[in-house]
Image (cartoon, grey):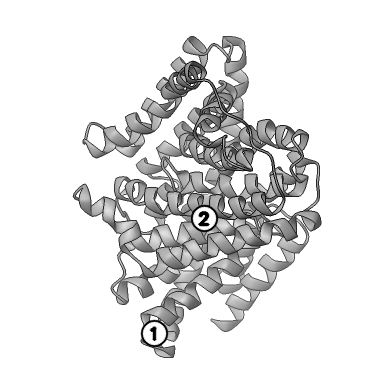
Amino acid sequence: MELSVLVLVITFVILLLLNVPIAISIGVSTLLTMLFTIAPLPAITTVAQQMATGINSFALLAIPFFILSGLLMGRGGIARRLIDFAKVLVGMFPGGLAYVNVLSCMFFGSISGSAVAATSAIGGFMIPIMNKEGYDRDFNAAITVTSSTTGLLIPPSNVLIVYSLASGGVSIAALFIAGYLPGILVGLGLIGVAAVLSVLNNYPVVGHTMFLESLKRFFDAIPSMLLIIIVIGGIIAGIFTATEASAVAVIYSLILSVLIYREVKFSELPGILLKTVETTAIVMLLIGTSKAMSWILSYENIPQTISATLIGLTESKILILLIINIILLAVGTFMDMTPAVLIFTPIFLPVAVALGIDPIHFGIMMVLNLCIGLCTPPVGSVLFVGCGIAGTTISKMIKPLLPFYVAMIIALIFVTYIPEISLFLPKFFGY
């Protein structure tokens, strides 16, 4: 067992260091490990079977629909309207554009379900404006990158659907509802950091908006924010499942972007559909290869060994959760969120359940933890997008990122050790 695991780890690390795409790295390292463990033909057959089985899930049908909905929202003028609305709410405070950035990323991230989309859409508008107003370029990129991750907690969220699959069927609706308070907590923490830095750096005030203009911006933003109410409200009321809700989200986004806002032309739809297919293919390949790696880990009894080791180290729930969080924080620096959830959920969830931790609470803790990895070098995908938009480098962003990391880690500690932050809303709605 030790030798096959060694082959898996070494092969995977080498491929990552060679900048091989993460899905290919997972698939190749898994195949080589199976070839080392069992005969060649059964190994190839098993990898193919596990990849096919991994994506053969009705719940996963929601992912391409939410991706399409997010792309339509991103092209449909939603970001600008949400930014205008956020200015009405917080623009009058010192450093108001920083608060506007955080709120806009939270609004847009929750609508699109994508941290990368939120960074691109909101960052593309906000970073140039903040640069022009005298805000530090690296600060602007740092606050955009970190606040964009809140959309992975505030539903609809594709990664919560992936966690539901990896956990063996935890309710997607319950996970969606559970993500609200932790997502808002992270957003408030980032706003707190922005407030302190804005005062210290004497960042300017946006200014007051006339009442009629404020009212207009509010009503302009309502159709965009209604998507969240329609999707989550429909799930809670039992009108449709999460997968059916994703299709409703596409229909609503299409009507809003094409017919109401008229910022997406019919001629642009084939390109948007093609981009949806490309993104879905990448996600599904990640899911398929990650499920195959999970199978070989299970075949070698790795989850059981790690569970026994952790519980053997200490019976303290506090210490075990601390160890799990430290491991996941390290994993998040070099592995994308989707494969990390698929590979490490079967390893750590049994430990959590043995300690009496609710799977919903554990899932939210895990996703929040891995959100930090999205804006952490060397592999943070959202970090690279933010650097590209801001025209800066990762090395320059590290210093302004540090206080935002602290805020996210403090939020993670609260979510980890106060289960009710995650469980209050699901319990309130009867999940």
Element type at marker 1? helix
State the separation of the CA atoms marked 1 and 2. Answer: 32 Å
Element type at marker 2? helix
| Mark 1 or 2, nearer chain start | 2
The amino acid marked with disc number 2 is: Gly
Q: Residue at 42% x, 29% y: name it.
A: 225
Q: Position of residue 333 (x, y in %)?
A: 64, 63
Q: How many marks?
A: 2
Q: Is residue 355 visible?
A: yes
Q: Is residue 95 above or below residue 295?
A: above
Residue 195 as seen in the image, left or right of residue 111? right
User: Residue tagged by mark 2?
Assistant: 189
Q: Residue furthest bottom?
A: 313
User: Residue tagged by mark 1?
Assistant: 311
266, 405: nearer the viewer? 405
Contact, CB < 8 Å: mark 1 with mark 2? no
Residue 345 as seen in the image, left or right of residue 207? left
409, 156: nearer the viewer? 409
99, 169: nearer the viewer? 99
Q: Residues within 10 Å of mark 2 (few under 14, many from 20)?
A: many
Instruction: Give residue 391's quadrant in the image.
Output: top right
The amino acid marked with disc number 1 is: Ile
Q: Position of residue 175 (x, y in %)?
A: 34, 50
Q: Position of residue 304 (x, y in %)?
A: 41, 78
Q: Residue at 66% x, 34% y: name it.
A: 126
Q: Is residue 262 above or below residue 422?
A: above
Q: Residue at 76% x, 46% y: name it.
A: 136
Q: Residue furthest left?
A: 430
Instruction: Give residue 355's quadrant in the image.
Output: bottom left
